[in-house]
Amino acid sequence: MYEDLNGKTAIVTGVGSRRGMGFAIATRLSKEGCRLLLADVRALDAIEPLADCIRSAGGIAEAFQCDIADETSVRSMVDHAISSFGQVDILINNAGILRAKAFLDYLPSDWDLMYNVMVKGSFLCTKSVAEKMLEKHIPGAIVNLSSMGGKRVFPGEAAYGTCKRAVLHLTQAAAAELSPLGIRVNGVAPGDHWTDMLEQCFREMAEREGRTVEDLIAESEAETPMRRMGTTEDVANVCAFLASDQSSFVTGQVINVNGGFFME
Ligand SMILES: NC(=O)c1ccc[n+]([C@@H]2O[C@H](COP(=O)([O-])OP(=O)(O)OC[C@H]3O[C@@H](n4cnc5c(N)ncnc54)[C@H](O)[C@@H]3O)[C@@H](O)[C@H]2O)c1
């Protein structure tokens, strides 16, 4: 348990699915006593049941529909968090999107979509939240979801990997400028974790390569020294650590959560 998290307010983006990273992160932060704003581009009908789930376990959570690629939408989300909870202490930039394609099949619109959500969207949320943190003299913590796809090259993920590499740079650039002002910025780089995103990616890859999803899962497990795929809780645990004062001298770091899939 991280006692300092009790009573803090966190915005988690990309909380639209019960089995996604965002919901696991929100659930973990709620268990630490955080008040939560759960945001996703999906309709409120999809987000509200997840907030309900946290509330029925005794937590404090609100749902908010937000397209993080849109500046006005991001400002409304942050204003909503401030009017509900008074301040924002923690931001988890989790929302993401993966369109996996062979390099030559990519369309410019695929690049625009992924860049706008993962790079520009993470920037917009960071800027908007950091401004409020500074206004209220909050020593904040921001955690960005990069990916092992941003650190290593995987065929079919040129656009996704490029964007996740950019998230890594964004994390370090923001840390360099915001840490002197009292805001730590870190990231996590997950490996393979079974969520809607990975399932869709494996299904499409299996079809392209004439293999089965089960083969791809077995291959991922075999290549991972810990011989399993990650859970969403594996990622949530590291996000909670990075959000808490237990990581008070950690900034500009992007921690691999990949069972040893690659080491650096
Ligand atoms: N699952 C993995 O193995 C894996 C590995 C590495 C990194 N990641 C990263 O972890 C994060 C969470 O991924 P996940 O696996 O839970 O996927 P997911 O698809 O379950 O969740 C992503 C969420 O982001 C939301 N979203 C998409 N565009 C948005 C927008 N414009 N505004 C607001 N929300 C938006 C989606 O609606 C969805 O609910 C992503 O950034 C992803 O790239 C996942």
Image (tube, helix red, strand yellow):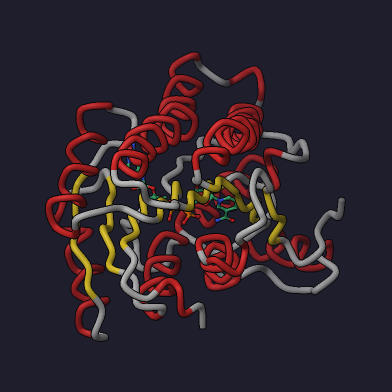
* Residue 142 x/y as whole percent: 48, 49
Res. 101 visible in picture? no
Name the residue nearer the viewer: 124 or 18: 124
In the rendered view, tell whether residue 47 sits above or below residue 146: below
Q: Is residue 137 left or right of residue 55?
A: right
Residue appearing at x 44%, y 74% in the figure: 28
Name the residue nearer the viewer: 202 or 264: 264
Where residue 71 sits, quadrant-wise, is top left
The extreme top residue here reads 108
Q: Is residue 153 left or right of residue 245?
A: right
Name the residue nearer the viewer: 19 or 175: 175
Residue appearing at x 51%, y 77% in the figure: 2
* Residue 241 x/y as whole percent: 57, 67
* Residue 133 x/y as whole percent: 35, 44
In the rendered view, tell whether residue 76 sits above or below residue 247: above
Where residue 151 sits, quadrant-wise, is top right
How many discs mark residues in the rendered view?
Answer: 0
Residue appearing at x 42%, y 26% in the figure: 116
In the rendered view, tell whether residue 93 sits above or below residue 244: above
Res. 28 visible in picture? yes
* Residue 236 x/y as whole percent: 52, 67
Residue appearing at x 20%, y 84% in the figure: 56
In the rendered view, tell whether residue 200 sits above or below residue 105: below
